[in-house]
Amino acid sequence: QVQLVESGGGLVQAGGSLRLSCAASGSIFSITAMGWYRQAPGKQRELVAAIASDSVTNYADSVKGRFTISRDNTKNTVYLQMNSLKPEGTAVYYCNCRAVTAVRGLYTYWGQGTQVTVSS
């Protein structure tokens, strides 16, 4: 089993910055991709950013140029640096990890979510 522990959410004014972290632990053979999704009230969960094991990144158009995703493979940790935050960025942010374990093989795991609130 894989556990994902997120941190770094909170309340910030528009234009401010936050840094989210997500650490994966457990009996992990390897991690392919890690990423961040978000879900605002009344909306579907959407991809924010993802990073593959070779560090290739993918961003939602709405955050390009403002958010940066990175990972530390030695710590099985992914980060999301969020700059120039906007009120529409208010949502619960979820960490996502595709990992290989002996029990489940390749499987997608989710964190519990961390609230990000951007005030105008």
Image: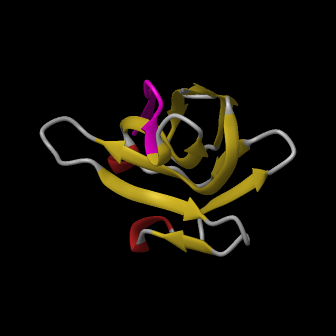
Q: Is residue 67 visible?
A: yes
Q: In the image, is 6 to the left or to the right of 40?
A: right
Residue 95: x %, y % from top left = 50, 40
Taking the view exactly as shown, the residue that stands out farthest to the right is 74
Find out whether residue 45 is within the magenta segment.
no
Residue 43: x %, y % from top left = 16, 45
Q: Quadrant of residue 18?
A: top right
Q: In the image, is 111 to the left or to the right of 46?
A: right
- Residue 88 vertical placement versus 113 (above, below): below
Residue 119: x %, y % from top left = 41, 34
19 and 88: which is toward the camera: 19
| Colouring | secondary structure
- Residue 100 vertical placement versus 23 (above, below): below
Q: Quadrant of residue 92?
A: top left
8 and 86: which is toward the camera: 8
Q: Is residue 87 visible?
A: no
Q: What is the tally of numbered marks visible in this picture?
A: 0
The N terminus, quarter of image? top right
Find out whether residue 110 is within the magenta segment.
yes
19 and 98: which is toward the camera: 98
The C terminus, quarter of image? top left
Q: In the image, is 51 to the left or to the right of 108?
A: right
Residue located 37% across and 39% down the image: 90
Residue located 44% across and 57% down the image: 48
Residue located 61% across and 43% down the image: 16
Tell me the magenta residue range: 108-120
